[in-house]
Amino acid sequence: MKALRDAFGETLVELGGEYPNLLVLDGDLANSTKADRFEAAYPDRFLEMGIAEQNMLGVAAGLAFLGFIPWLSSFTVFFTHRAADPLRMLVAQTKANVKIGAAYSGLLTGYTGKTHQDVEDLAIVRAMPDMAVLAPLDAIETRAMMRWATAYEGPVYLRLARDPSPIVLPEDYRFEAGRVLELKKGRDIALLGTGVETPRLLEAAKLLSAEGLEAGVYHLGSIKPLDEDDLVRKLRPYPRVFTAEEHSIHGGLGGLVAEVLAAHDPKPVVRIGIPDTWGESAPNDWLLDRYGLSAQRVAERVLKEVKQ
Amino acid sequence: MILSEAERGELERTARLVRYLILRTVQHSGAGHIGGPLSATELLVALFFKILRIDPQNPTWPDRDRFILSKGHAAVGLYSVMALRGYFPVEELLTFDKGGSRLQGHPDMTRLPGLDMSSGSLGQGLSPGVGYALGARLLNKDFHTWVMLGDGELQEGMVWEAVHTARRYRLGNLTAIVDYNGLQQYGWRGSGRGDRADPWAGFPLAEVFQSFGWRVIEIDGHDFEAILGAAAVARENAAGEQPTAIIAWTTKGKGLSFTEGRHAWHSKVPSEEDVRRAMEELGLSPEEVPL
C-alpha cells in the first residue's frame, strides 16, 4: 500500500535532480500533497504561491514560457473549479508546459466533504483542448506518469489521491500514453477503471469469479491522449462493459468510454460512479459503500445488471 | 524633456494613424472594440516605439522585454501598433476577426509571434507577468516585464492575488500599467469622466497599490513625455524590491469627438462615414493612411 501523494512527493525530488529547470509551485498545501519533500531537497526551486490558485496557474504559465517546467501542488478542486478559467486560458489554450499535480481527487479526501471532493474534474479537464489528462492507478504508475509528463512538452493534468492504495504494477512498469492496460483477461464482461478505482476492480473480479462470472479488468489511466482503436480492440471480445471511477458518471471515464463505443462498437456500457449528487464527509469505507465503488458493491452491481 | 519636438511629433502622428487604423479595422471586420483601444493608444505607441526592448524581426529574442495586454479586448489597438512597428504588414489588419487570421478578436500567442501571452478573460494578465518577472530573477536576466490592465478588470480578484505575489517576491522588474479610462462596458449609473460613473471614484487606487508595497506613479496617459518618464523610473528601479504601478489617467474613446467618454463605443462598429469623419478629425488625408 502506498498513497499516490507520497509517490508524487518522492518523484518530484527524483525529477528535481534530473531537471535543473524543474520548479514546484505550491498553493499552501505542500504538507498535504507531499510537495514539501521537494522544498526540503531544493528550497530555491520551491515557490510558495499562497492560497491563490488562479494566480499560481498564471505565474506557472509565465515561468513555462521562459523554459522552466513548473509542477503545481494543490487539491484537485482548486485547479479545476476555482481556477478553471486560468487553467483553460493561460495553460491549456497557450499549450504552456505546466504540470498540474492535482492531489486529493475523488471521494476519499480525508473527511472534508463535498467542498473538497472533486468528482467533476475529469469532465472539465478532458474537454479542454491540448490538455493531457492522466489518472494513475497506483504509486508505481504515478511515478511513471510523472516521468512521462516531465519529458512531454505541454500541459498535463495528473489526478492523484490522498490515501494509501494497493500497489498493482511491477517496479519496471513503463507508461505508454493513450493505451489501455489489460490487468486480467476475462470472458463475460469487462471492468474498466481509472485512477485508484482500478485496484478495487481486481478485487471485484475475484468476487465475480467465485460467482462464476469471468470479468476482464482494464485500466485507462491515459484519459487524454487516448488511442481509441486500442480501447475498442481490447473491449471488443466483451458483450458488456462496466466502467467504474471515483468521479461523476457524467463526463468522466464512463462518459468517455460510452462516447467511443457508441461511435465504433456499440454495446451496453454501465457507468459506475457518483450519480448526479454531492459527496459528504464520512470514513472511506462508508463512502465507497455508499457510492457503490467498493469491490463488493461493484461486484453486486455487475451481478444485478447481468441477471436483468 | 525626454523627447525632442521632432520625436514627440512623430509619436503623435503615429498615435493618430493608430486611432485611424483602429476604426478602419473594426469597420472592415464588422466587429471589435473601440473605446478601450483609443484610451490606450498613447500607452501602446510609447511602449512599442520607445519603451520595450524588442526586435520586431526577432520576436522570440530570449532577452526581449515581455509585454502582456491583460485588457485583451484592446487587441485591435495592439495589432495596429505592432503592424506599424513592423511585426507584420499593415494590410494584415484587414484579416482581423476573419476566420484563420493571426489577428484574433482577443490576442492569441499561439497564432501571432510577438505576443507573450494570450488574453481576453479579464484580470488574468498580471499573473503570467509575475511568472515572467520571477523567472527573470531566477535566470539572472535583466529584461523587464510590462503588463497593461484596464481599470475595469481591477474588479477581478485574481489581479490582487498577483499584486500580492509580486511584492512578496520583490519583483522590481515588473511594471503594471493601468489604462484608467474610468468607463467599462456597462458599469454603474451616473457620470464621471464619461456618460457612466467612474468605477473607482472614491476608491484611492494609488493608495491600494501602495499598501501592497508597490511604487505608484500617476500620470496623464495621453502625454508621451509623462509615459516615458514613468517607464524610465520603473526601469531604473528594476533591481529593487518594489514593483511599479503606473496609473495612467486616460479618456475612453480618446481622440474622436463622437467616441470620447461614451460607453456605447466600448465595442460599437463604426460606419464608413464614421471612419471618414475620424480621418478628418485626426487630420489625416486619404493618401497618408495605409488602409
Image (tube, coloured by chain):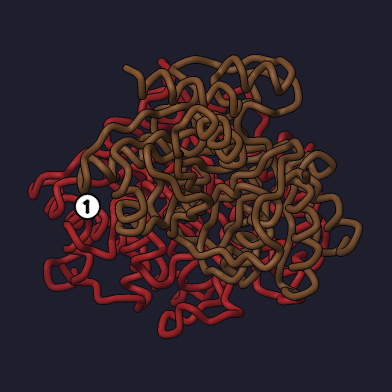
Counting from the top left corner in percent of width and height, residue A292 is at 54, 20
Colour chosen for chain A: brown
- Res. A55 visible in picture: yes
Which residue is at 73% across, 35% downward? B207
Q: Identify residue for label 1.
A: B23
User: Is B262 rendered above or below residue B7?
Assistant: above
Q: Residue furthest bottom?
A: B57
User: Is B243 rendered above or below residue A297?
Assistant: below
Counting from the top left corner in percent of width and height, residue A76 is at 62, 37
Which residue is at 36% across, 35% downward? A255
Q: Quadrant of the N terminus of chain B?
A: bottom right
Counting from the top left corner in percent of width and height, residue A78 is at 62, 35
Left or right: B290 as drawn, with respect to B85: left
Left or right: A50 as drawn, with respect to B113: right
Q: Name the foreground residue: A296 vs B94.
A: A296
Secondary structure beneath disc 1?
A: helix
Which residue is at 44% across, 66% downward? B115
Q: Quadrant of residue A202?
A: top right
Q: Quadrant of residue A53?
A: top right
Which residue is at 52% across, 69% downward? A153
User: Is A250 rendered above or below residue A137?
Assistant: above
Counting from the top left corner in percent of width and height, residue B165 is at 74, 47
Q: Residue furthest left?
A: B272
Q: Name the foreground residue: A132 vs B155.
A: A132
Q: Name the foreground residue: B221 vs A49.
A: A49
- Res. A82 visible in picture: no
Chain assignment, label 1? B
Chain identifier of the red chain: B
Amino acid bearing label 1 = Leu
